Amino acid sequence: MSIIRQRTKNLLVAGFVGALIMASIGMAIFTFMHIEMKALKIEISNMESIEVEEPIPRKDMYVFNQLIEAGDVIGEGDIMMVSAEEGLIPQNAITNKEEIVGKSTKLSVTTNMPVISDLLFTAEDIRDDLRIQEYSLFFLPSRLKTNDVIDIRITFPNGEDFIVLSKKQVKSIEKTEENNTVLETLWLHLSEEELLRISSAIVDAYLNEGSRLYGISYVMPEVQEAAKVNYPVNQAVYNLIKENPNIVDIAMEELEMNKRKTLEQNLSTFMDSEGEIISAAKPSSEEVDGGRLD
């Protein structure tokens, strides 16, 4: 009788354990399915949000695929079409190849630079009154080189400062050294109007002692707009030029001499200050002798 009870008890325990195991498995399956369904819902939600987003509009444009020097004629092999986000494309970008091939570049260009209308010119664009002018009287940036782009400005002793020539490309520059002073001569293309304006500014600077004409470089002339010319041509100066055209040459010579004197004075001041610094850094003879005695 006790054996039967023991078997019954064992069966009950086994049944209970089995039911517990089955319940655990069922709970695990339910939990797994719940997690999977939740992940699936998130994925579907993400897909729906992606589908709702509008694609970013793109547009084709031309870029240079190699280095081209200023004045070089552009061939078909010098450009290539690329696709870019519409918001990143310059407003004056050229999208028609026929408007590019056969034209020349105003400035040197590099690979992947957008082809914009402001960079190009044709022989027909060159004005009949354009002339090459040579100047040695401007104070120029020390690192200025050929094909750089500058503004020529005039500054007066009272602090007034005006733009005389705007966004002019340096066609050539020559640097010579005299008495340890570097003097620059540069060549520019100027129209008749620009020539009269710069002549007026030269005489203006000559008549107003302490004035000077100087150049300042553009950082990225390919994309920067030309500065607005705001130098008011002095009518009295203009009349003086008409009465005596030689006054321009006289003024240029005088300003060149003043520039040379200024540069020499600056160099002399620099050398004197350097000498004072070196002298101050050197130990005195007493200090040296004292050091020896010790």
Image (spheres, helix red, strand yellow):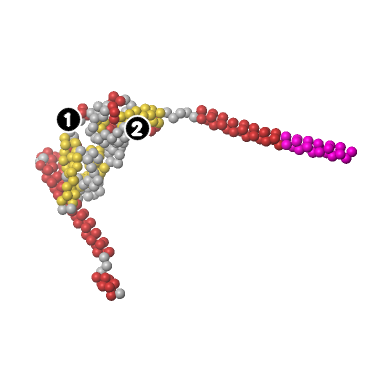
Residue found at x 25% / y 35%: 69
Q: Quadrant of the C terminus?
A: bottom left
Residue 114, horizontal then vertical, whole percent: 32, 32
In this picture, residue 155 sits left or right of residue 249: right
Position of residue 285 relative to residue 55, above or below, is below
* Residue named by callout 1: 128
| Amino acid, disc 2 | Pro
- Range shown magenta: 1-23
Tag 1: Cα neighbours inside 10 Å, few (<14), some, or many (≥20)?
few
Give the secondary structure at mark 2. loop
Q: Are marks 2 and 1 in contact (CB under 8 Å)?
A: no
Residue 19, horizontal then vertical, whole percent: 75, 35
Say which quarter of the image contains residue 219: top left
Q: Quadrant of the N terminus?
A: top right
Residue lying farthest bottom?
293
Residue 5 colored in magenta in the image: yes
Residue 223, horizontal then vertical, whole percent: 31, 36
Alpha carbon separation for disc pair 2 and 1? 31 Å
Decide which of 144, 193 is in the foreground and name it: 144
- Name which of mark 2 and mark 1 comes first in the sequence: 2
Decide which of 239, 195 is in the foreground and name it: 195
**Majority secondary structure of the magenta segment?**
helix
Residue 174 colored in magenta in the image: no
Residue 75, horizontal then vertical, whole percent: 26, 28
* Residue named by callout 2: 90
| Amino acid, disc 1 | Asp
